[in-house]
Amino acid sequence: MIQFEHATRTYGSKVAVSDLSLTIPSGELFALLGPNGAGKTTTIKMLVGLLRPSGGVVRVCGHDLITETRSAHLHLGYVPDEPYLYDKLTGHEFLRFIADMYRIPRDLSQEYIKREIDRFELHEFANELAENYSLGMRQRLVFAAAFLHDPDVLVLDEPMVGLDPRSVRIVKDLLKAKTADGMTVFMSTHTLAMAEEMADRMGIMVQGDLKFLGTVSELREQVDVETRSLENLYLEITSSSTERQRELSDDT
Amino acid sequence: MQNQLLDIPQENQLSRKLRRTIAWNVVTSIVRQSRFRFGLVLVLSLIFWAAVFCLFYDAFNFIDSMHAEVMSLLFNTFFSALMVMMIFSTGILMYGGLYRSAESSFLLTCPLRAEAIHAHKLTEALWFSSWGFILLGSPMLIAYGIVRDAPWSFFIMLLPFIVTFVVIPASIGSILCMLVVAGLPRLRLHALSISLAVAAIGILWGLWATFGAVQSQLLTAAWFEETLSRLAMTEQVFLPSWWLSSGLLDAALRGESRELTYKSTLEALNFLGLILANALLLSLLASWTARWTYRKGYSNLQAEVPIRRHRQLFWLDELLSRTGSRIGNPIRLLLVKDLQVFRRDVTQWSQFVIFFGLLGLYFYNLRSFNYTHVYASLIGHLNLAVVGLILSTFTTRFVFPSISLEGRRFWILGLLPIHRDQIVWSKFLFSFVGSLVPCLGLIVLSDSMLRLPWGTVFVHLTCCLALCGGLSGIAVGMGASMPNFRESSPAKIAAGFGGTLSLVLSAMFIILIVITVGFTNHFNLLQQTVGQLQGNTANWLLGSSGGQVASILIVVPGGLLATFLPLVLGIRAFRKLEP
């Protein structure tokens, strides 16, 4: 469903993502972890078509993000870390706009909009202008919009920021149910516990390189310290890579 | 569920529906929440429109009686200048809209064609860049039609002519913008600065070649004719501005017979067709450019490495923060902070430099003209009013929202060992001192170029001092009395009820100051130049030195009142504030 084939992205002389090859099949929830500046956001921007890879290919449901952008976007749902809403549209009008954009027939779209409003408990403010929404309300509406057209691939960038515990629960349950139905979820997060709880596989990225790819248990095996927490393992991987990089740059 | 891609008409329909819904929501929320502001804007716009109409009506009557053929030249000059300005303004607006807005990032992740996003943003840019043209052009052209007793078809054709014409420079600006971003990502800034510099030099050269290098004596009939002949360069048949002015002139022509009128109307329709065809072709080219370059250009721009600059403490900041007594230290530190923010906020200082720079340029050029004392005095007062009005727009736009913007960082200020009053005072001092230096400089420049007597210069400087204090006091005081901590955009804070009220109060204060001093000073000059203003006791009294002194006695307390009353009220409100 998601394919990165030797995807590379440079910013000037700096390599933000280096030769990333990764395939995420349908029905998998993949979590991408890494410290600040590791290349997570660049990877996500390439995946949603905002950035073109300097080299390599990124595909969604078999569609190349550069040559078949619209077809790829038709299968995508995206929840960015800083969601955009039209301040002068109500929540209901925004969902209507999204439904029209995906050409959902009128009779179905009414039903879908109602479904998402119920699911994310938007009733109270669905007819208010978005300019009056709190961060949590905005995030819930963006989730509703992302799920409205039942995408095959859902991309989430730090998805739980601003959500209250109840909404977090709703989102987690929904993600589990949707992946069970075949949806592919690509999630970037700093919350290790969340990745541990939700992800089928995870990747740890450090300075543009995918340092680890596998399940939590594979991660534990690789580091060979069964008793330690995921946090310690994560810190070990990221710090050793960062130090190695620093040593290399000192040498040069 | 199998989603489907939208076809081209559906994408356009979606964009139209979005804009319609947003426009409706904006209008209804303004009418519901800001009736005062809405009413004020409407009334002021109507007054402006009527004033421009009257001005052009008189001007066209004057020109019509002298040289009917001059009209063609004036229209060509006006529309060609407008075309150049619109190319630049649309280019800049499209850069912001296509490459820097959050909306474009959102739309680029949706299953829309690049052309559809471009068309959506171009329509938006067209509105922004052409509303001035409509506000200024419509009274001008209607006045022209009435003066020339144009047939009814002229008035019908006005809107199609304007709408089709604005698409041409807008499309050119948009194409240039996309090509620069896509083709020259690394050289973007350099390319942009060089092209702007070349354009500025070209415009200055054009102005100099047209007005400056004229051999005949200034403002004589020969000078006028020579200048007009130089303006003939705008009458090039390949320019869309020429098609527009020729079309409008033909449309306004009422022939001696029905056939002649019909013939000239047909000719006008030909020009309209020509403009329409070119507008469609250019919008198609812009659409193609978007298809091939927009996504690539956006990606290139995203991948650009931001320049990280290590910012050091500026000597003025260090001087301000280290000198003086310890008692005033918090205010000085807040001033240093505001100074740093001002210097690093390009929007603020660039507008400040552009507006005051243009005024300075205009004042400097006043020396080229030989005015009589009476005219010089009148222009001096008008210049004082202009300086005040421009300052009031700055105090409303940038100073009024400054307290509200501090609210978002209130937890920082709240934890510091400073009194709330000091925050308000620091804002006032920043605005007052910051405006005093350029405004006094401009008034001295204006009055010296007009060769006004020292007494008048002294009166103007006193007024300027009162204006700087009063306008800063009103903006800071009102900002502290009516803060808006929910909004992060200073433009939106300034556009609210408090900002509008502050602007109205500022305008009233300027009018009070300028009229009070203007009348007495002007009459005084008349009395000195022409002799006693006999036959009118009131004028004679106004024009005496006593009248001048009396006006100063009104201006000084008026300025103090406008400065301290809003400040005191603002400080009181700010003390009680619970953000």
Image: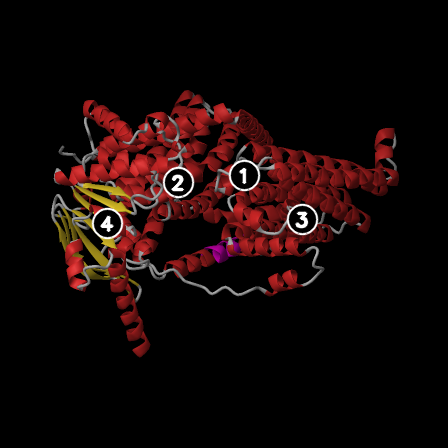
Mark in front: 1 vs 3: 1
Dominant secondary structure (helix, strand or loop) of the stretch shown in magenta: helix
Above-or-below relation of B242 to B326: above
User: Is B145 contained in the magenta span?
Assistant: no
Near mark 1 (Cα within 10 A), the count class, few <14, some 14-19 or many ≥20, is: few
Q: Earlier in the sequence, mark 1 or mark 2?
A: 2
Q: Residue at x 36, y 44 (%)?
A: B102
Tell me, yes or no, whether dots 2 and 4 are on the same chain: no
The residue pinned by badge 4 equals A195
Disc 2, disc 4: CB below 8 Å?
no
With A244 as the anchor, is A226 left or right in this view? left
Under mark 4, the amino acid is Ala
The residue pinned by badge 1 equals B579
Q: Chain of mark 1?
A: B
Per the rendered image, the range of residues in magenta is B199-207
Q: How far apart in space, not on screen, are marks 4 and 3 (Cα)?
A: 55 Å
Under mark 3, the amino acid is Phe
Under mark 2, the amino acid is Ala
Mark in front: 1 vs 4: 4
Residue B281 in view of the camera = no
Q: Chain of mark 4?
A: A
Q: Earlier in the sequence, mark 1 or mark 3?
A: 3
With A24 as the anchor, is B120 left or right in this view? right
The residue pinned by badge 3 equals B432
Q: How far apart in space, not on screen, are marks 2 and 4 (Cα)?
A: 43 Å
With A80 as the anchor, is B460 left or right in this view? right
Residue B370 in view of the camera = yes
Q: How far apart in space, not on screen, are marks 1 and 4 (Cα)?
A: 37 Å
- Secondary element type, mark 4: helix
Under mark 1, the amino acid is Pro
- Secondary element type, mark 2: helix
